[in-house]
Image: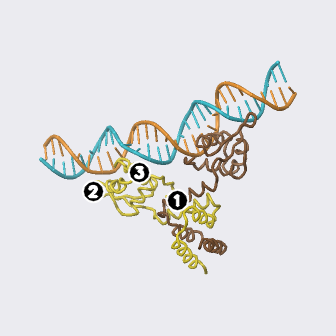
Chain colours: A yellow, B brown, C cyan, D orange
DNA sequence: GCCAAACGATGACACCTGTAATCGTAATAA
DNA sequence: TTATTACGATTACAGGTGTCATCGTTTGGC
């Protein structure tokens, strides 16, 4: 469950986080517009995610219904932490500084962040 | 130069960003404590980084001196953006919210962020 | 001048990833 | 009841990645 999820696998996870449970065909349908995958490809990705324990399936007649076995919240939290650790020694501020520089934050962004900070203060 | 840099390659880049230029042996020396790499491994990684254009080398007698060809700033900026785009639809605030939740921000972190926001405001 | 050490270049190899196709079987349509 | 279709399971295969070893050559020590 702490297994690494690849780029393509992540795209499948996003589909399932969006709507759930889904059959393999449905996942393919929803994922294909952007990725142009064959249904075979999607099935392979689903198998790998199953093996990693990132999703679960239950039988529905002859086919399976798939659903996420890990929460998106947990996943994005872990990934964010990994990036901050890897690139910024665990410090959040330089991350924000970088993002602010590269894509200027809108006044709304800034207001949001200020509100968030206010909440975080004791 | 916009080539993907792998995990192991990134570790080599960090060594070179820290100190530069270095010979292959020196890179291995500095990288090995944490990774336990053989010098062969490091040389392979250097070759691949060269091929990708992420580093450059100049002859120093019979060996090479390696140095980064891309700036750390640019790299971490790109990587941060990729994460924000992939996981948060490009929005910074939810990223911070996640990080704040998972590893509580210290009062210093919060102060830093506040200072940063103040600077960003017109 | 010769031998060992040191280099870069090249090769190796297993595992992961992206992207399918094929196989065997079960269900469905006719 | 048989032919087709729809599934999951299995197999495939090239390119990337992590991790080294070997080859051929240069050079520094003696």
Q: Can you say whether A53 is above or below B37 in the image?
A: below
Residue name at image x 61 percent, y 47 percent: B9
Using the numbered discs, state the Cα–Cα distance from disc 3 to disc 1 in whole angstroms: 21 Å
Q: Which residue is mark 2?
A: A61
**SS for dot 2:** loop
Using the numbered discs, state the Cα–Cα distance from disc 1 to disc 2 in whole angstroms: 39 Å
Nearer to us of marks 1 and 2 is 1
- Most extreme residue toward the bottom is A122
Could you say where residue A29 lies in the image, as x and y percent from the top left?
A: 32, 55
Q: Is the same chain shared between marks 3 and 2? A: yes
Q: Which residue is located at x 51 percent, y 69 percent?
A: B94
Mark 1 closeness class: few <14, some 14–19, many ≥20 residues within 10 Å: some
Q: What is the total number of numbered labels drawn onto the structure image?
A: 3
The image's mark for residue A45 is: 3
The C terminus of chain A - image quarter: bottom right
The label shown at residue A80 is none
Secondary-structure class at tag 1: helix
Is A12 left or right of A90, judged from the image as shown? left
Whole-percent x and y of residue A3?
Answer: 51, 55
Subunit that carries the residue with mark 2: A
Where is mark 1, residue-wise? B83
């Amino acid at each position: 469950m702490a297994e690494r999820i690849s780029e393509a696998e992540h795209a499948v996870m996003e589909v399932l986080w969006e709507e759930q449970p889904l059959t393999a065909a449905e996942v393919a349908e929803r994922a294909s517009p952007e990725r142009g995958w064959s249904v075979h490809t999607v099935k392979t990705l689903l198998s790998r995610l199953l093996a990693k324990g990132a999703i679960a399936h239950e039988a529905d007649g002859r086919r399976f219904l798939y659903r996420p076995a890990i929460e998106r919240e947990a996943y994005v939290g872990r990934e964010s932490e990994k990036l901050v650790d890897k690139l910024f020694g665990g410090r959040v501020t330089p991350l924000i500084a970088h993002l602010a520089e590269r894509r200027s934050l809108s006044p709304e962004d800034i207001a949001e962040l200020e509100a968030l900070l206010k909440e975080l203060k004791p």
